[in-house]
Amino acid sequence: MLPSQLEMLRRLVATPSVSSPDARFDQSNRGVVELVAEWAAELGFAARIEAVPGADGKVNLIAGLGEGIDGLVLSGHTDTVPYNVERWTSDPFELTERNGNLYGLGTADMKGFFAAALHAVARFEPNVLRRPITLLGTADEESTMAGARALAEKGESLGRYAIIGEPTNLIPIRKHKGVFYVRVTVGGKAGHASNPALGINAIEGLQRVLIALETWRDGLGGRYCDDDFEVTAPTLNFGRVAGGDSPNRICDECTLDIDMRLLPGMAAEEVLVELSDQVANALDGGRWTFDVQPVGNYASFSGPADAGFRSTVETLCGCSAKTALFATEAPYLAQLGLETLVLGAGDIGVAHQPDEYVTMAGIERATDLYVSLIRRYCTEAA
Ligand SMILES: [Zn+2]
């Protein structure tokens, strides 16, 4: 028998699946994927668990129900971010109800989605499906997006429409910026501070780079603009500088970590070339060396092209689709030809924080929305 939504959420929260670029916190997501696969199999899904290449212990779930093409994909990530246990009011792995809220790590982001999606499917007899339902459970969304990248690279045709159940307060999201991390390293030569001729100060080189990049950034806003976003321009933030060790030594190396938020339509590769040119020009005439490396790239998203899908979802939700400030797996599903929207219960504002929660009312409302979408896209004539 399929467990209740509350019991599903309890068991999913009790199964740790932290993903993190920091190996001290990183865990396998297999336990969560196996739970979802077991429940999906009870509903008649054919479920496959696939290892994610290059990510040890990480797996994707691909489960299909019904025959044919052009079906609906319901997709969620199975991992959570790390947590600070001392800042939680209750055990992050024990689903706890207080004031009508269900607290636990990953409740909103996004284990609650699987309870909603599975119970939505449970309301249909498999023989009423004219087009298939595909349930995806991905790995490492919170760290590298390796799971979704692997699906995109494999290129398997999964359906025509997709909903990603990230917490959006049940407001459909049709667009978000990309996140691009770059590290600039400036190299000089160490020496005694008493005589500048003995070395090449990397901090002085970086200073030139900072001024050049600030000017370049301010120019980007005039070249790229998207009024759909609250912050209409691409952004560039100097997030961290590091270098030097002692006032009496000439600094021989420093690094600068940059966060850029790119608009849909901007290619990270082209931005990187421009950025590298800025660094090269800024340091021209000096004896510094430099290196510019991309260290993280999460694509922007703009979709769906299918206006009918968007308006169907907007009508069901009773509001127009919006843009988001956070990145999702949507661009990777879009690469598979899926018309994609992001829509799920819970508030992104409580995600990635102590005392994350979702409400049962939210999960039930999400379930009803997913039922309507399954009815429209998998049971009705095309
Ligand atoms: Zn998420």
Image: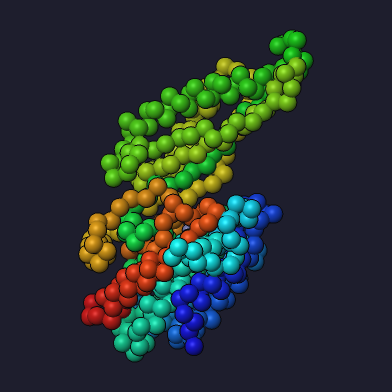
Nearer to us in this view, 118 or 291: 118
Q: Position of residue 298 (x, y in %)?
A: 48, 50
Vertical order, 214 against 379 (above or below): above
Vertical order, 249 against 368 (above or below): above
Nearer to us in this view, 267 or 361: 361
Quarter of the image for residue 160 reads: bottom left
Q: Position of residue 267 (x, y in %)?
A: 41, 44
Please give the name of the residue rendered at 43% of the width and 24% of the height, measured from the top-left corner: 215
Vertical order, 175 against 282 (above or below): below
Q: Position of residue 172 (x, y in %)?
A: 32, 59
Residue 341 visible, this angle: no
- Is residue 300 rendered to the left or right of residue 375? right
Residue furthest to the right: 192
Please give the name of the residue rendered at 45% of the width and 63% of the height, measured from the top-left corner: 99
Vertical order, 340 against 208 (above or below): below
Please give the name of the residue rendered at 49% of the width and 22% of the height, measured from the top-left corner: 211
Please give the name of the residue rendered at 28% of the width and 56% of the height, measured from the top-left corner: 321
Quarter of the image for residue 358 reads: bottom left
- Is residue 56 rendered to the left or right of residue 300? right
- Is residue 321 rendered to the left or right of residue 342? left
Q: Position of residue 250 (x, y in %)?
A: 72, 19
Residue 211 visible, this angle: yes
- Specify the quadrant that holds the C terminus: bottom left
Q: How is the image coloured?
A: rainbow
